[in-house]
Amino acid sequence: MSEQVREIAISELHGFEDHPFQVKDDESFQELCDSIQKYGILSPLLARPTEDGYEIVSGHRRKAAALSLGMDRLPVLVRDMTDDEAVILMVDSNIQRENLLPSEKAFAYKMKYEALKHQGKATSCQVGTKLRTDAYIASQTDESARNIQRYIRLTYLAKPILDLVDEQRIAFSPAVELSYLTKQEQAELWDIMQSEDCTPSLSQAVRMKKLSQIVQLTPERIFDIMSEEKANQKERVRLEVSAIRKYFPRSYTPEQMEQSILKMLDEQYKRRQRNRDAR
């Protein structure tokens, strides 16, 4: 396997196919831009040669930061790799990042799982000294083998529902149960969630999964289950994150936004009380 560091034009560096990790314009990204502007690229990108240039294996954020700073060439460690080797290295280079979305972990673990299975380095069952593939991945992370399996299940969710998981409007456990619903059942569930402005609890998700398994999850049954009033959904006011995102730092989660809004409302209420008492 040959490798060397080269100065390569950004226009020749292409993103990894089906790269599961997002490049977010958050506080961490701004810190990276500041560092590059001050010190330059301290660690070369890693890429492999392709027919039309180079495919980035590690360094998508560094490339995006360099582009925002107007740079046109970057130091790149060029290495010949097979598809499976590139996938495994790409995932391993990013999976330990903080604040990864559930969808990012889900597709990353699935890509690594399939690459390892293809390589034959791990198996679907315990054979000799080989670990199960999910256990092999777990041994290299702080996740359990069961959680690796559950994250991979999220890749079977329809994108609108998976987006709600990323937005923390659907919790991880019910999301895993919903992943067993067929595409048609998920589409019907999504329509009802939109019309009724609700999301399923774990209990509701489990019941829908069981009905799906015996081919009895009709739109009517989904509606009946989702129409049940839950304590945490009584008289709720819902704001779309996209509508209020501009008022908060890029790094804020939906929960932090909610806490800030409640804090501001509480302060406003206390000011009104003080003004009323002063009259």
Image (cartoon, rainbow, N blue to C red):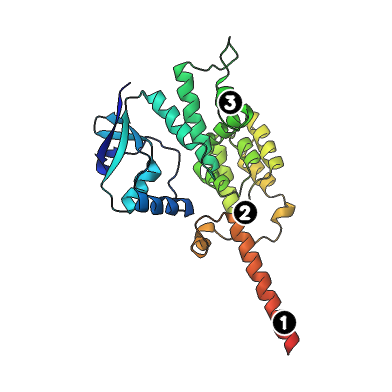
Mark 1 packing: few (<14 Cα in 10 Å), some, or many (20+)? few
Counting from the top left corner in percent of width and height, residue 40 is at: 34, 48
Which one is in front in this view, the residue at disc 1 or the one at disc 2?
1
Outermost residue toward the top?
128
Q: Is residue 238 visible?
A: no
Q: In whole angstroms, how far apart are the C-alphas of marks 1 and 3? A: 58 Å
Along the line of sight, which residue is nearer the eye, 255 or 136?
Answer: 136
Q: Considering the numbered disc 2 on the image, is that residue within a helix, a strand or a loop? A: helix
Q: Which residue is mark 1?
A: 274
Q: Which mark's residue is nearer the viewer, 2 or 3?
A: 3
Left or right: residue 219 compared with residue 247: right
Residue 147 location, quadrant: top right
Residue depicted at 59% across the width and 60% down the height: 257
Quarter of the image where the C terminus is located:
bottom right
Q: Quadrant of the N terminus?
A: top left
Q: Which mark is residue 196?
A: 2
Residue 120 in the image: x percent, y percent?
47, 15
Circle 3 — which element? loop
Q: Nearer the viewer, residue 218 or 121?
A: 121
* Residue 124 % position (x, y): 56, 17
Q: Which residue position holds label 3?
A: 139
Is residue 132 shown to the viewer in this render? yes
Q: For the residue marked with disc 2, what is the amino acid? A: Glu
Q: Quadrant of residue 34?
A: bottom left
Q: Give the vertical position of 247 relative to 218 (above or below).
A: below
Q: In terms of sequence position, does the residue under pointer 1 or pointer 2 come before the other?
A: 2
Residue type at mark 1: give it: Arg
